[in-house]
Image (cartoon, rainbow, N blue to C red):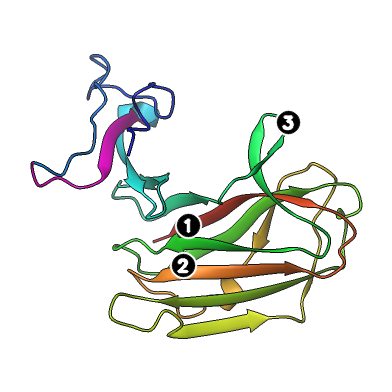
Amino acid sequence: MSNPLNNNRFLPRAQPGGSGPVPPHAPTHEDGGSDEVTAQNLGSGGAAVDQVMVTDGAGGWVLEDKSTGATKEIFYFADLASNDGAYRVRNILTNGSFRFDFKVPHDFTSLVTLALVGWPEPGAAGAGKDIDLTSEYGSVGELRNNHSESDVGSTYNLGATDVIFELDISGVFSSLAAGDYAGLLVSHNSIGGTVHYLGIRLRYS
């Protein structure tokens, strides 16, 4: 797997105190290491905020916040297959469906935000959009569908054309726990157009 930080454009890096850049660190297993690439950003007031690039289990990478603050955040990119402007996206058509995956961090205690991020094309924009959500999730040693929930009755306001929205999907993950592997099936029911999805945003404490 290639190191996502080799081109120095994913994370701003600095030595503690701002004394210079931290060189990229390639993941390795020969020395007993893990698939993590560390970096340190300087927050407001010079406070150090540690972040790490970790494998998403599907050949990609996600940014995980390792700081000790009350709230942390990870973004899980979808299996991206199309372009929209400068973005790489996953399109779901008016009657289409797609599956998204993510893993709950080991230090998860409680859920703050769990949202599907995207924006609509003309026709898919606006209120009353019939979208079904089905989840399956479980941890190591459990059935993959140890928990399974669905919402086939709700409709959603996807906002204006090309305006980014966050669609709340927490309702079908009511028993989420640290270490869970999770899948989400998103099904459009004649919503009038295509939606460009980026992935899933998870905020937790």
In the image, 97 versus 163, the foreground residue is 97
Query: Label 1 to label 2, Cα distance in Å?
Result: 7 Å
Residue numbers of the magenta segment:
31-42
- Contact between marks 1 and 2 (CB within 8 A): the answer is yes
Q: CA distance from mark 1 to mark 3?
A: 27 Å
Q: Secondary structure at mark 2?
A: strand
- Whether 88 is among the magenta residues is no
Q: Is residue 1 left or right of residue 19?
A: right
Mark carried by residue 154: none
Identify the residue at image location x=58%, y=52%: 199
Outermost top residue: 20
Name of the residue lying farthest toward the left: 31
Name the quarter where the N terminus is drawn.
top left
The secondary structure type at the circle numbered 3 is loop
Q: Answer with mark 1 or mark 3, whichever residue precedes in sequence.
A: 3
Q: Residues within 10 Å of mark 1 (few under 14, many from 20)?
A: some
Q: Is residue 58 above or below residue 17?
A: below
Q: Earlier in the sequence, mark 3 or mark 2?
A: 3
Q: Nearer the viewer, mark 3 or mark 2?
A: 3
The residue depicted at 34 percent of the width and 70 percent of the height is 178
Q: Which mark is residue 85?
A: 3
Label 2: how many residues lie within 10 Å, few (<14), some (14-19) or many (20+)? some
Q: Label 1 belongs to which residue?
A: 203
Q: Which residue is under mark 2? A: 111
Q: Which label's residue is closer to the chain start, 1 or 2?
A: 2
Q: Are marks 3 and 2 in contact (CB under 8 Å)?
A: no
Q: Residue at x 60, y 60 (%)?
A: 115
Type of residue at label 2? Leu
Q: Position of residue 188 (x, y in %)?
A: 78, 67
Q: Amino acid at mark 3?
A: Gly
Query: What is the quadrant of residue 82 in the picture?
Result: top right
